[in-house]
Image (cartoon, helix red, strand yellow):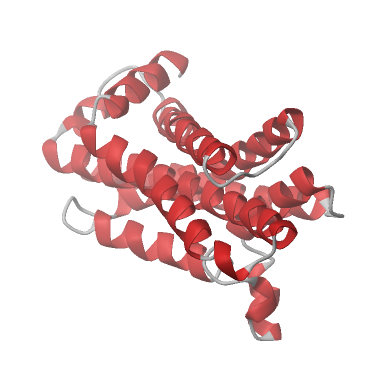
């Protein structure tokens, strides 16, 4: 599995679209939104706002990276015949599905680091390096869900529909997941739903870690675990169905 994961990762990193959509876009949004709102806040308020938004964009970056890497690329591979070739190799279903998931997670890490760097160097976020490293760990842990979801999308859509499906999923987890809309501004019922999404838990847990706020680690782990297991199992079933259909 690790050899296949390394192969997938190198293929993705050679793609120019990866650099633009996955690395640059979250950084640009992070810098632009914080700078545009800087005049509305005092120095202390801006520090809190910029730190929270850094974690929102870190979560957005990993969701975007996982969905685009696993979803769009896998659907294109199925359309081009590459997936059919993979099903004939000695690789097991868990090797291929697991390799896609691990590669997608790895692709998201540079994007998250780029967001952190822009927050510290440009937006003036002051944070302990060890706490920031812990926040990165939370992002990586939560990204398993989205890498598995991207794999499901790639296995059940076509090359023409994968992008639309990935964008719908991205918008859902960005909006309902509280990355583009504060939890406090939502109706109570929607806020309750938001707290059950992995994207919210990534941002909420990460922000809590770097600011010292009280957060529930067990709640986040439970949310991550339930979503991840559901999508990994779905990916394995979708793989078996797609593998049979291509033969």
Q: Nearer the viewer, residue 80 or 45?
A: 45
Q: Quadrant of the N terminus?
A: top left
**Is residue 79 placed above or below 41 in the rendered structure?**
above
- 219 left or right of 70 in image: right
Inspect this view and state whether residue 227 appears.
no
Picture quadrant of residue 204 = bottom right
Nearer to the camera, 40 or 88:
40
- Farthest top residue in view: 3
Horizontal side of residue 193 vs 112, given as left or right: right
Please provide percent x and percent y for residue 166. 34, 57
Q: Position of residue 18 (x, y in %)?
A: 30, 37
Q: Is residue 64 visible?
A: yes
Q: Position of residue 3 (x, y in %)?
A: 41, 13
**Left or right relative to 168: residue 180:** right
Residue 231, above or below 140: below
Identify which residue is drawn at 63% across, 81% down.
186
Q: What residue occupies the far right of the structure in this picture?
A: 214
Quick check: 95 above or below 44?
above
Count the labels in the image.
Answer: 0
Image quadrant occupied by the C terminus = top left
Depth check: give the residue in front, 157 or 238: 157
Identify the residue shown where x is 44% and y is 25%.
95
């Amino acid at each position: 599995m690790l050899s296949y994961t390394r192969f997938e990762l190198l293929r993705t990193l050679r793609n120019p679209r990866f650099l633009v959509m996955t690395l640059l876009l979250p950084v640009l949004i992070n810098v632009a939104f914080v700078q545009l709102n800087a005049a509305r806040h005092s120095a202390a308020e801006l520090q809190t706002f910029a730190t929270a938004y850094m974690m929102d964009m870190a979560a957005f970056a990993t969701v975007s990276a996982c969905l685009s890497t696993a979803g769009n690329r896998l659907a294109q591979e199925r359309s081009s015949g590459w997936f059919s070739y993979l099903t004939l190799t000695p690789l097991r279903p868990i090797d291929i599905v697991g390799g896609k998931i691990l590669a997608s997670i790895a692709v998201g890490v540079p994007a998250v680091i780029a967001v952190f760097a822009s927050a510290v160097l440009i937006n003036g976020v002051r944070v302990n390096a060890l706490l920031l490293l812990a926040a990165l760990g939370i992002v990586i842990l939560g990204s398993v869900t989205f890498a598995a979801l991207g794999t499901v999308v790639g296995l059940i859509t076509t090359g023409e529909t994968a992008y639309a499906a990935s964008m719908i999923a991205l918008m859902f987890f960005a909006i309902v997941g509280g990355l583009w809309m504060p939890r406090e501004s939502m109706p109570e019922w929607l806020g309750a739903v938001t707290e059950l999404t992995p994207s919210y838990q990534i941002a909420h847990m990460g922000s809590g870690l770097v600011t010292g706020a009280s957060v529930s680690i067990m709640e986040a782990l439970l949310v991550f675990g339930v979503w991840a297991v559901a999508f990994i199992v779905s990916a394995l079933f979708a793989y078996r169905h797609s593998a049979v259909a291509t033969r």
